[in-house]
């Protein structure tokens, strides 16, 4: 049995409280004979910046590039841009995946079950901003090659689900950049036999609140995907339950969606579901789809049992919820 090398970056705020649970969850899977993991921790984030002068030390980046099969990253505070974006670029993590689905017992605006497939390396997030006096402007970068990579992954995911996808751009205004993304995406999805439609991002945002069941796989650009992903997470329940995957052809990085939540750090009340589901996405990417499905079922069973942290209206601590979840998961895996 292969041993998978996992680089764990605890991050800031509530991250160091959640990292041990991620380690324990991997140990549960190993104890059940599902997979083997070698886990190493490395620093990054605000505290690391204060201590070393670098938010993402070279040693951490080297481990991610040259040692790890996958990176499991906790939330980072104000230095997030200096940690996340370099990791995405250096590891060539071309696509961000954000599942959003309702969970039992979690108040939601609407029921949904969708995946946002977001281009992860281009758009205005290349950070090419300039100013001259009272003038400020930013470069928006879109390439056909990168769009094809993301669209091919969206097509694969769509064929594993309903066979349909929605492309989201603002190509009626940004005719060159968004127009290229739309054209290439439509070509790829048509070639792959995926039924698809196109929506402008403002209409898609409204429809995601009004009728999210219309969507299954949403293929979109970097900035729009960033915004729509958080919108979908909140409509479906809570950022505290949402997980994300940054994937490339070789490497991948997984992280909870919520922030560092400095206001509750150290109080033991953080919702661990986002971290749990991030581990689930990671093991799914590593090839253990059955383990991912068991993790999701165990989360759902725990919530149905009434286990909820304060952000979901309950009184369970972080550890108390995790213990309920672990008991459920072990029963499913036995």
Image (cartoon, rainbow, N blue to C red):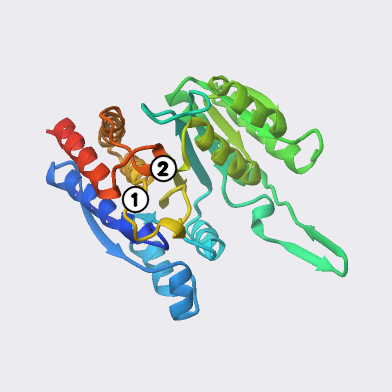
Alpha carbon of mark 1 to alpha carbon of mark 2: how far?
8 Å
Res 298 quadrant in image: top left
Q: Is residue 191 above or below residue 279?
A: above
Q: Position of residue 230 (x, y in %)?
A: 55, 41
Viewer-proximal residue, 237 or 311?
A: 311
Q: Is residue 107 left or right of residue 334?
A: right
Dot 1 falls on a residue whose secondary structure is loop
Q: Is residue 130 visible?
A: yes
Residue 269: numbered disc: 1
Q: Position of residue 128 (x, y in %)?
A: 71, 61
Mark 1 and 2 residues: CB-CB less than 8 Å, in contact?
yes
Q: Is residue 156 visible?
A: no
Residue 311: numbered disc: 2
Q: Is residue 46 above or below residue 275?
A: below
Q: Position of residue 302 (x, y in %)?
A: 26, 33
Residue located at (19% from left, 34% from top): 328
Viewer-proximal residue, 269 or 231?
A: 269
Q: Position of residue 51 (x, y in %)?
A: 43, 79
The quadrant in which the C terminus is found is top left
Residue located at (43% from left, 28% from top): 102
Q: Is residue 124 above or below residue 207?
A: below
Res 245 quadrant in image: top left
Dot 2 falls on a residue whose secondary structure is helix
Residue located at (60% from left, 38% from top): 228
Looking at marks 1 and 2 on the same chain, the residue that comes earlier in the sequence is marked by 1
């Amino acid at each position: 049995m292969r041993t998978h090398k996992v680089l764990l970056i605890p991050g800031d705020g509530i991250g160091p409280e959640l990292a041990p649970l991620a380690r324990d969850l991997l140990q549960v899977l190993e104890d059940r004979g599902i997979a083997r993991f070698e886990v190493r921790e490395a620093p990054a984030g605000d505290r690391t910046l204060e201590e070393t002068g670098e938010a993402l030390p070279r040693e951490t980046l080297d481990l991610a590039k040259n040692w790890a099969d996958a990176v499991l990253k906790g939330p980072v505070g104000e230095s997030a841009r200096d940690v996340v974006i370099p990791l995405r670029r250096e590891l060539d993590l071309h696509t961000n995946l954000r599942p959003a689905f309702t969970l039992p017992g979690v108040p939601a605006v609407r029921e949904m079950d969708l995946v946002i497939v977001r281009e992860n390396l281009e758009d205005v997030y290349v950070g090419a901003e300039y100013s001259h006096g009272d003038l400020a402007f930013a470069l928006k970068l879109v390439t056909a090659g990168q769009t094809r990579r993301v669209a091919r992954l969206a097509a694969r995911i769509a064929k594993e689900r309903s066979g349909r996808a929605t492309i989201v751009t603002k190509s009626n205004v940004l005719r060159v950049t968004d127009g290229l993304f739309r054209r290439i995406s439509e070509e790829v999805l048509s070639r792959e036999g995926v039924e698809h439609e196109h929506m402008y991002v403002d209409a898609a945002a409204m429809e995601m609140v009004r009728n999210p069941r219309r969507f299954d796989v949403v293929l979109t650009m970097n900035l729009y995907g960033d915004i729509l992903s958080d919108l979908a997470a909140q409509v479906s329940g809570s950022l505290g339950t949402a997980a994300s995957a940054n994937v490339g052809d070789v490497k991948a990085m997984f992280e909870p969606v919520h922030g560092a939540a400095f206001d509750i750090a150290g109080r033991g009340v953080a919702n661990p579901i986002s971290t749990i589901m991030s581990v689930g996405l990671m093991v799914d990417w590593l090839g253990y789809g059955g383990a991912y499905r068991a993790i999701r079922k165990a989360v759902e069973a725990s919530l149905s049992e009434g286990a909820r942290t304060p952000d979901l209206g309950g009184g369970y601590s972080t550890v108390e919820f995790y213990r309920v979840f672990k008991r459920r998961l072990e029963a499913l895996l036995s």
